[in-house]
Image (cartoon, rainbow, N blue to C red):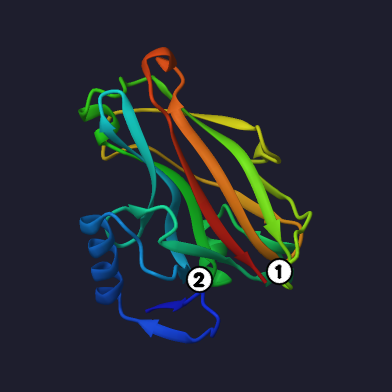
Amino acid sequence: MTEVKERSTTVRARVVSPLAAIVLALAAAIFGAGPAHAATWTSGHIDVVYAEATSATNLTLRTHPDPGPSVPAGTWDIAVPHTPALGGYVLPESYSDSVAYDLPFAGFGGSSNLISSGAFSPGDTLALRLDSVVHTNPNGTPGTGTVTVSHGGTTWYDGAGDRHDFSVRSGSSAFHEHAKWVFSAPGTYELKFYGYNSTTFGSWTGSTSTYTFVVS
């Protein structure tokens, strides 16, 4: 089962069955909106930043939980607890570590419709740029916390303005990568990503979405 917490003035923990989680995702996909209060993803596989094409020259950045269809960005907050064995506030790149420590297995992905829509051709690159990082301390004051995202020991993002290119391919997913996410301090982090086709950028409309990580 997936444990979720609602973000509100009164914080209550509740347990939702896998079926209920699928219904939540379907409702969000059908009606185009997330729940009134974002639920918190505490463990299991999730492609936090997930790109889908909406036309041959446009895309949208969403989130793809497992199981379930993609949902709008902001449907889920991502929990990042303090895990001393991993060195602090860390979401691991390794699936086995995510299972061992009961943490979100957070990654990046792209729908196969990026190619089937004509938006991308195999070998094109989808650029994801980290436009901003906003940290709020647990007491609600502005913070100075940072986040570093790396893969295989190579840093992809360590501040606003950083960009990583994902190679698009044919298959069940256009791209799919997991990463190590390291946060420097507790609090709430809002990460704004901008995605676009960096191969044919001149004829493209990009997409921006914000993702929330709750570090505690």
Q: Is residue 155 above or below residue 34?
A: above
Q: Residue under circle 2?
A: 42
Image quarter of residue 171: top left
Q: Position of residue 195 (x, y in %)?
A: 46, 33
Q: Position of residue 181 (x, y in %)?
A: 63, 52
Q: Amino acid at mark 1?
A: Gly
Q: Residues within 10 Å of mark 2 (few under 14, many from 20)?
A: many
Q: SS of the residue at dot 1?
A: loop
Judged left or right of residue 46, residue 116 is left
Q: Earlier in the sequence, mark 2 or mark 1?
A: 2
- Quarter that holds the C terminus: bottom right
Image quarter of residue 214: bottom right
Q: Position of residue 43 (x, y in %)?
A: 48, 69
| Disc number lying in front (2 or 1) | 1
- Quarter that holds the N terminus: bottom left
Residue in the image at 44% along x and 78% along y: 3
Q: Amino acid at mark 2?
A: Thr
Q: Residue under circle 1?
A: 140
Image quarter of residue 136: bottom right
**Marks 2 and 1, how far apart at CA:** 22 Å
From where the camera sits, is residue 186 visible? yes
Judged left or right of residue 208, residue 79 is right
Residue in the image at 58% along x and 71% along y: 101
Residue 202 is marked as none
